[in-house]
């Protein structure tokens, strides 16, 4: 699978260490197998905990980073174990479909484009929603170089999304936004969407989502379910979110 450059040294490794073939063939008929998984919390489809990002050494709610907060064994606050199961209205904003195909590489999606897409789909974000943005780059999952050049949401677009009081946002790319290393002049940070959503607003971010089937079937509203692993103090968690269509969606706001 594609990896963000900062996680590539770890990658993804699965080793079978307890094998059926190692059992005594003259012993009991039932045998067991199990393995060891080595990866980062931010591999594949995953969700970011609020402790994942800091600005000026401060986490969400102004919590200052110190040795009691950031320990060798994880974070004592805002770890992934504090993220509740996400059961909410999922709203797909198919920007790629709105423009008739996959967006240009490293293109930043504006607030105006997100708004126009909502009008076209006849939907409007509301409090508590999970917003899913499709760039079309999910089609290039098997091509790491091209996938890492994906389009993403601009900081103005993220500000627009966050104004509705959403609970989480995600996209079919590696970084939600365009990870070009440029410093945002307003916040003086790289990855300003991460700073805005995770540090300022307390809105979770999901990356590497598979939104192709939702888009092809034009399912713009669904019951979205995502349950992060409760890894104490971790900065994120691999997830397998699902979107359930054809059901009555409660208003969770």
Image (spheres, rainbow, N blue to C red):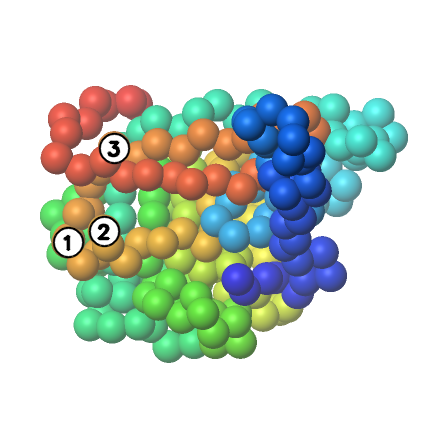
User: Quick check: marks 1 and 3 in contact, CB under 8 Å?
Assistant: no
Tag shown at residue 97: none
User: Quick check: marks 2 and 1 in contact, CB under 8 Å?
Assistant: yes
Q: Is residue 179 visible?
A: yes
Identify the element where label 1 is drawn: loop
Q: Position of residue 220 (x, y in %)?
A: 19, 47
Q: Position of residue 100 (x, y in %)?
A: 20, 72
In which quadrant will I find the C terminus? Answer: top left
The residue wearing badge 3 is 223
Mark 3 crowdedness (10 Å alpha carbons): few <14, some 14-19, many ≥20: many
In this rendering, is residue 135 above or below 30?
below
User: Which is more N-terminal, label 3 or label 1?
Assistant: 1
Residue 32 picture quarter: top right
| Residue at the image point whose x is 44% and y is 25% from the top | 85
Label 2, label 1: how many angstroms apart (C-alpha)? 5 Å
The residue wearing badge 2 is 214
User: Quick check: marks 3 and 2 in contact, CB under 8 Å?
Assistant: no
| Residue at the image point whose x is 54% and y is 64% from the top | 2
Q: Is residue 155 visible?
A: no
94 or 85, which lies in front? 85
Q: Position of residue 224 (x, y in %)?
A: 31, 35
96 or 29, which lies in front? 29
10 or 21, which lies in front? 21
> Which residue reaches farthest right?
67
The residue wearing badge 1 is 217
| Residue at the image point whose x is 52% and y is 57% from the top | 175
| Residue at the image point whose x is 68% and y is 62% from the top | 8
User: Which is more N-terminal, label 2 or label 3?
Assistant: 2
Q: How many marks?
A: 3
């Amino acid at each position: 699978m594609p990896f963000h450059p900062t996680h590539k040294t770890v990658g993804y490794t699965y080793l079978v260490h307890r094998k059926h073939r190692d059992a005594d063939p003259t012993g009991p008929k039932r045998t067991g197998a199990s393995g060891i998984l080595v990866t980062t919390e931010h591999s594949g489809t995953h969700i970011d905990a609020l402790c994942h990002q800091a600005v000026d050494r401060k986490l969400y709610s102004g919590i200052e980073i110190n040795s009691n907060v950031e320990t060798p064994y994880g974070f004592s606050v805002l770890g992934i174990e504090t993220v509740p199961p996400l059961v909410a209205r999922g709203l797909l904003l198919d920007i790629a479909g709105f423009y008739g195909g996959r967006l240009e590489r490293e293109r930043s999606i504006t607030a105006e484009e997100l708004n126009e897409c909502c009008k076209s789909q006849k939907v409007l974000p509301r409090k508590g929603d999970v917003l899913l943005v499709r760039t079309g780059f999910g089609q290039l999952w098997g091509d790491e170089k091209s996938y890492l050049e994906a389009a993403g949401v601009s900081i103005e677009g993220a500000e627009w999304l966050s104004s509705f009081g959403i609970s989480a946002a995600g996209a079919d790319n590696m970084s939600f936004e365009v990870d070009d290393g440029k410093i945002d002049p307003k916040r003086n940070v790289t990855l300003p969407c991460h700073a805005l959503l995770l540090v300022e607003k307390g809105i979770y971010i999901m990356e590497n989502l598979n939104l192709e089937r939702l888009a092809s079937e034009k399912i713009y509203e669904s019951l979205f379910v995502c349950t992060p692993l409760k890894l104490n103090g971790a900065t994120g968690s691999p997830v397998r979110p699902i979107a359930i269509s054809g059901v009555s969606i409660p208003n969770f706001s």
